[in-house]
């Protein structure tokens, strides 16, 4: 019995993953390592980070992720912005860990 797996590596797969991380953010159903790193890095770009915080806050609201909503709202406050963005990156590391450990195909038992 052959297992069909979607190819996620290669030039096109990485470019698409970076696009999903940059444009879709937390709305993306699945991000790989490149997409999660892109999403985290854009949070530190002035003005772009605020737009990403609003986008991700809306996505977290729809997914009922209270911690994600709170961190994205704090990221909009000038004094707490850097601290909240750092915490949001730490909160989002589960995406990076999931991307590292689940992108590899496992042999059938």
Image (cartoon, helix red, strand yellow):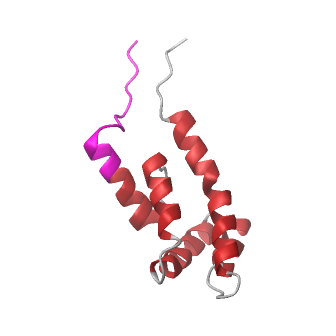
Residue 64 at least partly seen: no
Quarter of the picture containing the N terminus is: top left
Quarter of the picture containing the C terminus is: top right
Residue drawn where x is 68% and y is 73% of the image:
84
Seen in the picture, residue 73 relative to 42 is either above or below; the reply is below
Image coordinates of residue 56 in percent, x first then y, are 55, 70
Farthest bottom residue in view: 78
Residue drawn where x is 64% and y is 88% of the image:
78
Give 107 or 75, whichever is nearer the viewer. 75
Residue 48 at least partly seen: yes
In-image side of 8 versus 41 (left or right): left
Residue drawn where x is 73% and y is 68% of the image:
66
Residue drawn where x is 37% and y is 25% of the image:
4
In reply to whether residue 73 is colored magenta, the answer given is: no
Image coordinates of residue 49 in percent, x first then y, are 51, 76
In reply to whether residue 9 is colored magenta, the answer given is: yes
Magenta range? 1-15
Seen in the picture, residue 31 relative to 91 is either above or below; the reply is above
Seen in the picture, residue 47 relative to 12 is either above or below; the reply is below
Farthest left residue in view: 12
Image coordinates of residue 83 in percent, x first then y, are 70, 74
In-image side of 48 versus 97 (left or right): left
Seen in the picture, residue 33 relative to 51 is either above or below; the reply is above
Numbered label tally: 0
Image coordinates of residue 28 in percent, x first then y, are 47, 58
């Amino acid at each position: 019995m052959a297992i069909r797996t979607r190819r996620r590596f290669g030039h096109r797969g990485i470019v698409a993953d970076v696009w999903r991380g940059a444009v879709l953010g937390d709305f993306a159903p699945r991000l790989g390592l490149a997409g999660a790193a892109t999403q985290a890095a854009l949070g530190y770009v002035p003005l772009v980070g605020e737009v990403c915080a609003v986008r991700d806050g809306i996505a977290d609201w729809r997914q009922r992720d209270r911690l994600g909503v709170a961190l994205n709202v704090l990221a909009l406050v000038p004094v707490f912005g850097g601290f909240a963005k750092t915490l949001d990156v730490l909160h989002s590391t589960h995406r990076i860990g999931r991307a590292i450990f689940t992108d590899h195909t496992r042999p059938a038992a």
